[in-house]
Image (cartoon, rainbow, N blue to C red):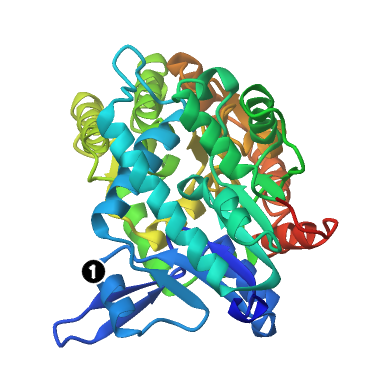
Amino acid sequence: MASSFGAAQVLVASNRGPVSYEVLDDGSLRTKRGGGGLVSGLSAIGPEADALWVCSALSDGDREAVRRGAGEDGVRMLDIPADVHADAYNGIANSVLWFVHHMLYQTPLEPVFDAEFRRQWASYERYNRAFAEALAAEAARGAAVLVQDYHLTLVPGMLRELRPDLRIAHFSHTPWAPPEYFAMLPGDIARQVLRGMLGADRLGFLTRRWADAFTACAERFADGLGDTRVGVHGLGADADFLRARAHEADVEERIAALREEIGEGRRTIVRVDRTELSKNIVRGLLAYRQLLDDRPEWRERVVHVAFAYPSRQDLAVYRDYTAEVQRLAEEINERYGTPGWRPVVLHVKDDFARSLAAYRLADVALVNPIRDGMNLVAKEVPVVSDAGCALVLSREAGAHEELGEDAITVNPYDVVETAGALHEALTMSAGERTERTKRLADSATALPPARWFLEQLDALRALPGGERG
């Protein structure tokens, strides 16, 4: 049987891979490489580790690359049928599991677990099965497999059945729902998700709160954790990369352009988010409007720089949310703006260099999610801030566990409290702001991406040997 095993000693599985492809007009393929913690981590273990990244082909260009056999070394892209991927990704992962873990449902109307849900769930199973089979085929005997996120909750259990010799980990980049909310899922589906996760030797979460929520669900619905270990790894910001990138020429250009939009001598309240429902952008704008009402002395003296980059625009609820963000920003500008002052500077086109420019200029960073696994923006702003930045932070962000002591904490639903916190942040003395920013940056970079990945890999390899199942 050993002869049928692959050669990879370390495998990562995720929906989105480290590379994507585009078919150019002349028929050639253009390669685009991504970044992030997993990329940093895999590069840190070195080429001699025989690592492989298994991911899904997401675009027509990706699928064409698979068909041509034109993939990168160290990456295996799965050409899962587009309709199956759409059902699994949009129908289940983003419209059910994401909503459950972020507690986003308007429960008088949703969710509705009907025959269509069951049809899409079958696609989610098929999608997870494709990953499990690919990993089983590519992994060397006793290899370490690190499965990522809510898209692939069934993979550990499926893979355990196929390859009991492997060491399997799963990491959740989202929150985990408390048992009372998780129980919204149909009972058989809830048990299937938990059994899938518990096929892993080790489960990783961003904070103790999310790890404890999973454990509570496992005890209530799946007879406990069994042999599965649970660990916490709070992903931090990559200080070296961010500080270097934030001083490149394109960022300097964006700073000059933003200063022009903001105007001379004004304070800045900065937020940078995807227009994701959980990010709470609308209530952030309402809080800013409340600040201008309650504290008219700030009119013409402060600008809210809000970057709301489109997310999941193939889902109607996200398109509606994006439109509401834009509508409210326009309303505030019309109501309070003057010929020389635009109260809200809103940008919706994704631009990383401009985001870094805003980080550097921020006097106040507003991070007020309803619920967030971590929120790296809260960690990145203090790292690159030029003059120190006060952080207004939701108690429901995973980052609050590490940063709360030096942030101004808010209830994300309380617009009046958030307006007061913005005033407190704007009036914080320069000395206190500098001191807090330094401590925030230290906490934010305690576990940079490469170390975050290696810590999980080391913990997985350190577990007692022996096959399970």
Residue under the image location 35 percent in, 59 percent down: 351
Residue 437 x/y as whole percent: 66, 45
- From the viewer's side, name the closer residue of 405 and 400: 400
Is residue 256 visible to us here?
A: yes
- From the viewer's side, name the closer residue of 4 and 361: 4
Picture quadrant where residue 431 is located: top right
Residue 105 x/y as whole percent: 38, 23
Q: Does 322 sit left or right of 143 as displayed?
A: left
Is residue 368 visible to us here?
A: no
Q: Does 430 sit left or right of 268 as displayed?
A: right
| Amino acid type shown at disc 1 | Asp
Quarter that holds the N terminus:
bottom right
Residue under the image location 63 percent in, 40 percent down: 430
Determine whether 25 is above or below 308 in the image.
below
Could you say whether the residue bearing mark 1 is in a helix, strand or loop? Answer: helix
Residue 252 x/y as whole percent: 42, 66
- From the viewer's side, name the closer residue of 394 and 87: 87
Determine whether 122 is above or below 128 in the image.
above
Picture quadrant where residue 416 is located: top left
Q: Does 325 sit left or right of 50 as displayed?
A: left
Mark 1 Cα shell of 10 Å, populated few (<14), some (14-19), many (≥20): some
Residue 283 x/y as whole percent: 38, 24
Residue under the image location 59 percent in, 39 percent down: 195
Circle 1 residue: 60
